[in-house]
């Protein structure tokens, strides 16, 4: 599945990343947090059809 993850850090820097080929939402968030660190705000939305 593909998720669009929005990550906002403590300095209010916003990043939007498309994470492909992950099993679920939690895996997408974990991948982005591994890349950018813990976010002040993190959201993940699934893209595409079921």
Image (cartoon, rainbow, N blue to C red):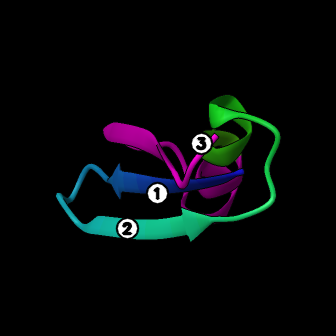
Q: 12 above or below 41?
A: below
Q: 17 above or below 22?
A: below
Span of residues in magenta: 31-50
- Residue depicted at 31% across the width and 38% down the height: 40
Q: 22 above or below 20?
A: above
- Residue depicted at 71% across the width and 53% down the height: 31
* CA distance separating discs 1 and 2: 7 Å
Residue 33 falls left or right of residue 21: left
Quarter containing the C terminus: top right
For mark 1, what is the residue?
A: 4
Label 1 close to label 2 by CB (< 8 Å)? yes
* CA distance separating discs 3 and 1: 10 Å
For mark 2, what is the residue?
A: 16
Q: Position of residue 32 (x, y in %)?
A: 60, 56
Quadrant assignment, res 45: top left
Q: Considering the numbered disc 1 on the image, is that residue within a helix, a strand or a loop?
A: strand
Callout 1: few (<14), some (14-19), or many (20+) C-alpha neighbours within 10 Å? Answer: some
Label 3 close to label 1 by CB (< 8 Å)? no
Q: Considering the numbered disc 2 on the image, is that residue within a helix, a strand or a loop?
A: strand
Q: Which residue occupies the extreme left position in the image?
A: 12
Residue 39 falls left or right of residue 35: left
* CA distance separating discs 3 and 2: 12 Å
Q: Which mark is residue 39?
A: none
Foreground of the two, 3 or 8: 3
Q: Position of residue 49 (x, y in %)?
A: 57, 48
Q: Position of residue 5 (x, y in %)?
A: 45, 53
For mark 3, what is the residue?
A: 29
Q: 23 above or below 1?
A: above
Q: Position of residue 18 (x, y in %)?
A: 54, 68
Callout 3: few (<14), some (14-19), or many (20+) C-alpha neighbours within 10 Å? Answer: many
**Is residue 45 within the magenta segment?**
yes
Quadrant assignment, res 48: bottom right
């Amino acid at each position: 599945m593909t998720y669009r993850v929005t990550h906002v850090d403590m300095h209010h820097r916003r990043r939007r990343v498309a994470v492909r080929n992950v099993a679920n939402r939690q895996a997408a968030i974990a991948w982005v947090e591994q890349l950018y660190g813990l976010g002040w705000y993190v959201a993940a939305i699934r893209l595409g059809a079921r």
